[in-house]
Image (cartoon, helix red, strand yellow):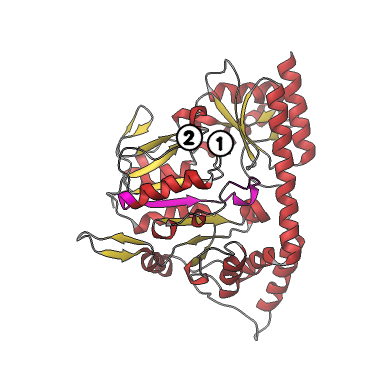
């Protein structure tokens, strides 16, 4: 058999696996040193109690013949889809039948490539979440890698000049990946800024894949939590969300994608085809649905107790981000994000290489961050910190950093 040659076009290592390898090698050489992880966006707080209780009840359901659940609906159980529609999209034009529950946002962001043409021109932010780039390269849309850029992509530059929030390009794109609040920069679009993107997509008959996995961290009233707050977005946008960073489901795997029934693509003869129909077909063919037990746990996040517990967890991580942001600013870093986001995006004056800065902090402060260049060429010189560690370790990490900078 012949392999998919696109895999061989990818850089040898995925960003986060490279960080993990460097940490492993460092710990092998320095077994007595405690490295504080401020890099990978995994959570540290335990699951909300409401979710744990709900999953215990669901496990009991699985142990009795009268309440046992086998294969569930590929789109997700109605009880969860209805809870999502009633709570996350209260007052917005999103129905339960337009919501597809999955095993996580990352899976959906990659799998959506099954429903649009391999000839599609894809627009990605630089810097941006690596899955947007890598999944489309694997599917054959990248072209060739030339000086760190894929030849068939439209790159949306995110820099201090535009607040790390790109504006629509002059060039045409068929599929646009936007993340707000953004990973890694923490920047978040206002409704006015998103309106420009919806208008661009309508004018270009383009699709926006809107990653709002961190929407629970939005505190600013002018910042959109959902793209469907924008008039006309139902005709141009798919939205992807996750329970991972809000309710701590990173180890459980549950997310969802919204595909409005008013959203269409075009076939080779330029005939309109509903994208919801294609996504449903894709899911029923390749996916057997998220587990019943996990979906009951996700449903519990919408109970009164669950809402309060999730809010407390989000507030905890935002407080950590504020500590990081304030400490780094006082230490002389250029600091972005950390307000409507758990991520803090920073640049140290005079540091030209992200991996050198990573190595310096690891060696001198025993702190692990994420090199910004791993998110795109414009991330060079930046590093990303996350607020997802414990409060105690966040404070200790910042104390260590202050000691290093002061010397």
Residue drawn at x 65%, y 53% as measured from the top left: 246
Q: Residue at x 46, y 45 (%)?
A: 178
**For the residues marked 1 and 2, what is the alpha-carbon distance in whole angstroms?**
8 Å
Asked which quadrant contains residue 87, the reply is: bottom right
User: Residue 253 in the image: x percent, y percent?
Assistant: 59, 58
In the foreground, 283 or 302 = 302
Tell me: 178 left or right of 1: right
The answer to whether 227 appears left or right of 171 in the picture is right
Q: Identify the mark nearer the N-term, 1 or 2.
A: 2
Residue 365 x/y as whole percent: 71, 24
Tell me if I can see residue 387 in this picture: yes
Q: List the residue tagged with mark 1.
A: 185
Which residue is label 2 attached to? 127
Toward the right, the furthest residue is 392
Contact? badges 1 and 2 (CB < 8 Å) = yes
Q: Residues within 10 Å of mark 2 (few under 14, many from 20)?
A: many
| 327 or 109, nearer to the observer | 327
Residue at the farthest left position: 269
In this image, 375 relative to 292: left or right? left
Quarter that holds the C terminus: top right
Magenta part of the chain: 203-222
Vertical comparison of 221 with 146: above or below: below
Secondary structure category for the residue under label 2: loop
Q: Is residue 170 above or below residue 147?
A: below
Dot 1 falls on a residue whose secondary structure is loop
Give x and y (percent) for residue 238.
44, 57
């Amino acid at each position: 058999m012949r392999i998919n040659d696109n895999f061989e076009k990818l850089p040898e290592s995925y960003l986060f696996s490279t960080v993990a390898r460097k940490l492993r090698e460092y710990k092998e050489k320095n077994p007595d040193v405690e490295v504080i992880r401020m890099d990978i966006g995994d959570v540290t707080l335990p699951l909300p109690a409401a979710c744990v209780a709900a999953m215990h009840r669901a496990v009991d359901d699985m142990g009795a013949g009268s309440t046992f659940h086998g294969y569930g609906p590929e789109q997700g159980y109605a009880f969860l889809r209805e809870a999502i529609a009633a709570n996350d999209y209260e007052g917005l034009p999103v129905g339960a039948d337009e919501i597809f529950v999955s095993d996580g946002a990352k899976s959906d962001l990659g799998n959506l490539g099954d429903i649009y043409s391999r000839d599609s021109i894809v627009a990605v932010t630089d810097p941006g979440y690596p899955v947007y780039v890598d999944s489309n390269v694997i599917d054959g849309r990248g072209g060739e890698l030339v000086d760190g850029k894929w030849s068939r992509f439209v790159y949306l530059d995110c820099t201090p000049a535009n607040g790390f929030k790109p504006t629509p390009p002059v060039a045409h794109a068929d599929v646009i990946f936007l993340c707000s609040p953004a990973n890694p920069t923490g920047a978040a679009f206002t409704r006015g800024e998103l309106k420009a993107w919806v208008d661009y997509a309508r004018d270009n008959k383009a699709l926006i894949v809107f990653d709002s996995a961190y929407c629970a961290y939005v505190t600013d009233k002018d910042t959109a939590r959902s793209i469907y707050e924008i008039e006309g977005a139902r005709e141009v946008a798919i939205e992807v969300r996750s329970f991972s960073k809000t309710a701590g489901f990173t180890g459980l795997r549950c997310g969802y994608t919204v595909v409005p029934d008013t959203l269409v693509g075009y076939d080779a003869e330029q005939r309109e085809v509903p994208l919801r129909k294609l996504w449903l077909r894709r899911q029923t063919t390749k996916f057997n649905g998220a587990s019943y037990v996990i979906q009951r746990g996700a449903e519990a996040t919408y109970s009164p107790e669950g809402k309060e517990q999730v809010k407390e967890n989000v507030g905890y991580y935002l407080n950590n981000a504020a500590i990081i942001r304030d400490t780094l600013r006082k230490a002389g870093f250029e600091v972005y994000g950390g307000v409507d986001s758990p991520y803090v995006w920073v640049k140290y004056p005079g540091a030209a290489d992200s991996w050198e800065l990573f190595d310096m902090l690891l060696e001198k402060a025993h702190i692990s961050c994420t090199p910004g260049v791993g998110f795109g060429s414009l991330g060079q010189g930046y590093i990303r910190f996350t607020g997802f560690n414990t409060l105690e370790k966040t404070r200790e990490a910042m104390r260590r950093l202050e000691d290093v900078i002061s010397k």
